[in-house]
């Protein structure tokens, strides 16, 4: 094996070991969903090591480890599935002040399976221009898939100031644009709404402390993070993820 090949294998070994170590730490902390992802990534890296190395003893050792990690990953999958079935699943994500990397796709992607066809959004603050853009970006994410969304239900509140006509025209424009993609947007208003939650008809429910409006105002119209929300600093907030057998009808 060339020196460059050996260096590459060593790098894979380090990355695999670090990823599996993180998986074990998350596992011990009962953060099972995150642990499962790390186990899967670590297993993939170690399989690459087995494929690349010529050392038979090392191959044998890693195959044994991989088998152990795969068994644990399967156990975690079963545990998570049971929690879903029992309605006990709960995952919490804490977004720190000024944290980046929390665009909508990152936050929601793992829950948007192909079977998702209906979405419920309950958020009292889809009123101002930037909040309307947040909702539009969320809808764009749904359009891109892999889910096949056909209906979106929005429950929000009226703008109580002079911006109501702007709010209404913005929502109507989003509604028309979605219609062009074969998606129906149903809009309802409530003066007593306080909760912020998003539900998918595959049973996932996501509650964000600040709703969709957890991004900070960009420094300028041409500053990094203005377009790409993954690069936009966030306000501190908490995201709670649950799974329920029955999707609430608003």
Image: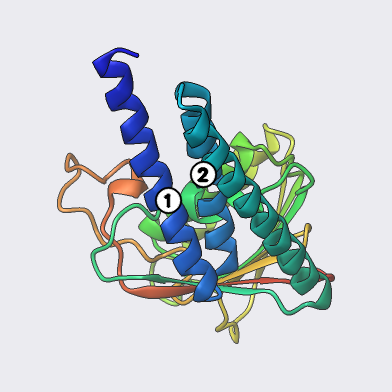
- Count neighbours of disc 2 (C-alpha within 10 A) and say few if under 14, some if 14 to 19, many if 20 or more: some
**Residue shown at 38% from the left, 34% from the top:** 12
Question: Disc 2 designates what residue?
Answer: 41
Q: Secondary structure at mark 2?
A: helix
> Can you see residue 139?
no
* Image quadrant in which you'd find residue 144: top right
Q: Judge from the rendering whether residue 212 lies leftward or rightward of residue 86; answer left or right.
A: left
* Image quadrant in which you'd find residue 248: bottom right
Question: Disc 1 designates what residue?
Answer: 19
Are the residues tagged 2 and 1 within 8 Å (C-beta)? Answer: yes
Mark 2–mark 1 Cα distance, whole angstroms, equals: 7 Å
Q: Position of residue 216 (x, y in %)?
A: 27, 62
Q: Quadrant of the N terminus?
A: top left
Total of numbered circles in the picture? 2
Q: Judge from the rendering whether residue 171 lies leftward or rightward of residue 242; answer left or right.
A: left
**Residue shown at 27% from the left, 45% from the top:** 226
Q: Nearer the viewer, residue 135 or 112?
A: 112
Considering every residue shown, the one lying at the far top of the view is 2
- Count neighbours of disc 1 (C-alpha within 10 A) and say few if under 14, some if 14 to 19, many if 20 or more: many
Q: Position of residue 191 (x, y in %)?
A: 59, 83
> Can you see residue 149?
yes
Q: Nearer the viewer, residue 149 or 55?
A: 55
Which of the marked residues, 2 or 1, is nearer the chain's N terminus? 1
Q: Is 181 rendered above or below residue 127?
A: above
Q: Judge from the rendering whether residue 216 lies leftward or rightward of residue 127; answer left or right.
A: left
Q: Which mark is residue 83?
A: none
Q: Secondary structure at mark 1?
A: helix
**Residue shown at 50% from the left, 38% from the top:** 46
Q: Nearer the viewer, residue 203 or 71?
A: 71
Q: Position of residue 176 (x, y in %)?
A: 63, 41
């Amino acid at each position: 094996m060339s020196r460059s090949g050996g260096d590459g294998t060593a790098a894979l070994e380090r990355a695999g070991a670090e990823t599996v170590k993180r998986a074990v730490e998350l596992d011990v902390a009962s953060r099972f969903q995150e642990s499962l992802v790390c186990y899967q990534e670590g297993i993939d890296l170690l399989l690459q090591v087995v494929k690349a190395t010529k050392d038979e003893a090392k191959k044998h050792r890693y195959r044994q480890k991989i088998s152990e990690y795969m068994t644990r990953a399967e156990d975690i999958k079963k545990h998570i599935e049971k929690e879903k079935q029992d309605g006990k699943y709960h995952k919490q994500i804490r977004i720190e002040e000024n944290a980046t990397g929390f665009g909508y796709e990152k936050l929601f992607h793992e829950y948007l399976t192909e079977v998702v066809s209906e979405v419920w959004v309950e958020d009292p603050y889809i009123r101002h221009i930037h909040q309307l853009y947040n909702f539009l970006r969320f809808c764009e994410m749904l359009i891109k898939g892999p889910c096949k969304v056909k209906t979106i239900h929005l429950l929000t509140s009226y703008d109580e100031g002079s911006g109501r006509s702007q709010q209404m025209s913005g929502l109507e424009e989003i509604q028309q644009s979605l219609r062009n993609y074969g998606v129906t947007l149903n809009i309802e208003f409530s003066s007593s709404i306080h909760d912020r939650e998003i539900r998918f008809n595959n049973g996932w429910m996501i509650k964000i402390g600040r709703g969709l409006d957890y991004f900070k105002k960009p420094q300028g119209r041409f500053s990094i993070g203005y377009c790409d929300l993954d690069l936009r600093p966030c306000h501190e907030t908490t995201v709670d993820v649950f799974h329920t057998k029955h999707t609430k009808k608003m």
